[in-house]
Image (cartoon, helix red, strand yellow):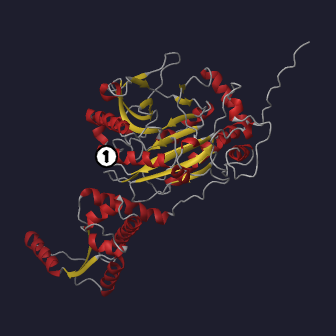
Amino acid sequence: MPSTPTPRPTRSPRSSLSGGVGCAPPLPLLSPGGAAAAAASCCSAHSHSHSHSLPSATISAQSAAPLGLPLPTSSLVTLATCNLNQWALDFEGNFQRILRSCQVAKSRGATYRLGPELEICGYGCEDHFLEMDTFRHGWETLAKLFASGATDDLMCDFGMPVLHGGVRYNCRVICKDRRVLLVRPKCALADNGNYREGRYFTAYRAPAKGSGMETILLPREPFFTEYHQRSAPFGLHHLQCSDSATLGCESCEELWTPQSTHISLSLRGVEILSNGSGSHHELRKLQTRMELMINATRKCGGVYLYANQRGCDGGRTYYDGCAMIVVNGRIVAQARQFDVREVEVVCATVDLEDVRSYRASNPAFGIQAARSASEEGGTSAWALSLEGVTLTNDCQKWSPEVERQRPKVMTEGGLELRVPTPEEECCLGPACWMWDFLRRSGAAGFFLPLSGGADSSSVAAIVAVMCTLVTKASREDPDGDVAKECRRVCRKDDPWVPSSPQEMANCILHTTFMGTENSSEVTLSRAKRLGEAVGSYHQSIKIDLVVEAILKVFQITTGRVPKFS
């Protein structure tokens, strides 16, 4: 008589298992349905206060292990991107700001941190990119980041110049746990407007199919002697983590090109797309950036992270930050566009199942993805498989403090976008640039001949906005970097912070009305009232004697008398 077969455990729907063991407390998810049920049912297994219980058919972690079944994993991932106020060739200062951004990302439970383009050396190094010292100091700074623990338990995407095969490349260097996982060169350079990347770098071209993986030799000290790594993959690969999360890069200009890199990455199944950028401010340029990223993820699905430099890095341009995270056409995290703080990190917790279901619901995407896989020899042709490297959240490792700071999963609809008006852009951009120029040039302040006309009055108003931003940041954090710089520039002792923007303006802005016999009382009064409103140290003087002396010298020299009609 045949024996009765042992009944097999019945699987519950996927949605009841997707949260995994040790998942986060009940969260509002990016989309309703299966993913929401996953978080709710998973959390009910670990929360005595929750009133619901798992269905009887669900395989628990304890019952799955003896049967040899894989334990369910979370599809939630916490990602971080940032604005950094980097300075060209300030390797030590840049290192400190990068390290601080990594520490903030870790404190919020992030498993991946994206930084701006060329953040290690600064974007505006110009012809210093032609010097070997710039490349050597870049690797030295990366080694310092390893030694400081910046990459411990955090996948970091750094921007730095790399010399490979005698060619200069603008690269993304992806690292984790003190190992270089991938060096990804930029394949489309910006050479229009203010950009001259083609002068310093070469656009990368991938080798022909079947030629094998390209590698780059890392500096022996300290990568081999201390971290036992001699080489790293080099090229346009994407990363396939052991928890099935996939991550790929494009860099700044590649987003703006007709055949953008994110299209091919999305068709290969890459879920997390990152863009470390060095984009300067132009009027209404932010709207164009947003439209590009929103449309990219709306068509192809995916999580798109954007990082940017913010501030004046020694040149005449102002980089306007506004790091953001976009999921399936919706912005779920956005940093400030204009600010005086040196480091700003924004995070978002997203559900990768939303990306997968979004793409699977689009038949056109499926057709093109299948065609792309056929042409490239499979979706894994460009993938680097990373054993033991994960991105999804392991909530069991989190401390209560990290759990409190970790961003909750964004609800349906995304954020209300913060886009300044054109008038605000014209005021805030120059104000932030002037603060960086003032504090880094070593100047004691500004001198402004204030006539009461439109030009000089506009400059005074911009300085007033600068003082407003600095005063606000200083009073919010009296021990922070902005407050310390403010005390140094204003020549004040600790713990002074300005009580008002006018108090700060009185220390750094000197205005003078230089009147002559041709000046009117209207302009005199206007300049005085504006100086009082701004808070500047204001004086009104007559310069008729100076004018007469200059006219006399001209008359003696040329024998002519200037006449103004």
Q: Residue at x 55, y 34 (%)?
A: 390
Q: What amino acid type is highlighted by mark number 1?
A: Ala
Residue located beneath label 1 in the image: 88
Could you say which quadrant of the image residue 234 lies in? top left
Q: Quadrant of the C terminus?
A: bottom left
Against 196, residue 7 (above or below) is: above
Res 166 seen here: yes
Going by the image, does 55 lie left or right of 82?
right
Against 445, residue 172 (above or below) is: above
Q: Residue at x 76, y 49 (%)?
A: 52
Percent x, y of residue 554: 12, 71
Residue found at the far right of this picture: 1
Percent x, y of residue 207: 47, 21
Q: Residue at x 59, y 35 (%)?
A: 263
Could you say which quadrant of the image residue 413 lies in? bottom right
Residue found at the far left of this picture: 556
Against 355, residue 447 (above or below) is: below
Q: Residues within 10 Å of mark 1 (few under 14, many from 20)?
A: many
Tell me the SS state at disc 1. Answer: loop
Q: Residue at x 51, y 53 (%)?
A: 286
Residue found at the far bottom of this picture: 521
Going by the image, does 24 lie left or right of 289?
right
Res 203 seen here: no
Could you say which quadrant of the image residue 387 lies in? top right
Percent x, y of residue 559: 10, 72
Work out whether residue 279 or residue 93 is closer to the camera in this orientation and state it: 93
Work out whether residue 278 or residue 502 is closer to the camera in this orientation and state it: 502
Q: Quadrant of the N terminus?
A: top right
The tally of labels here is: 1
Percent x, y of residue 100: 40, 48
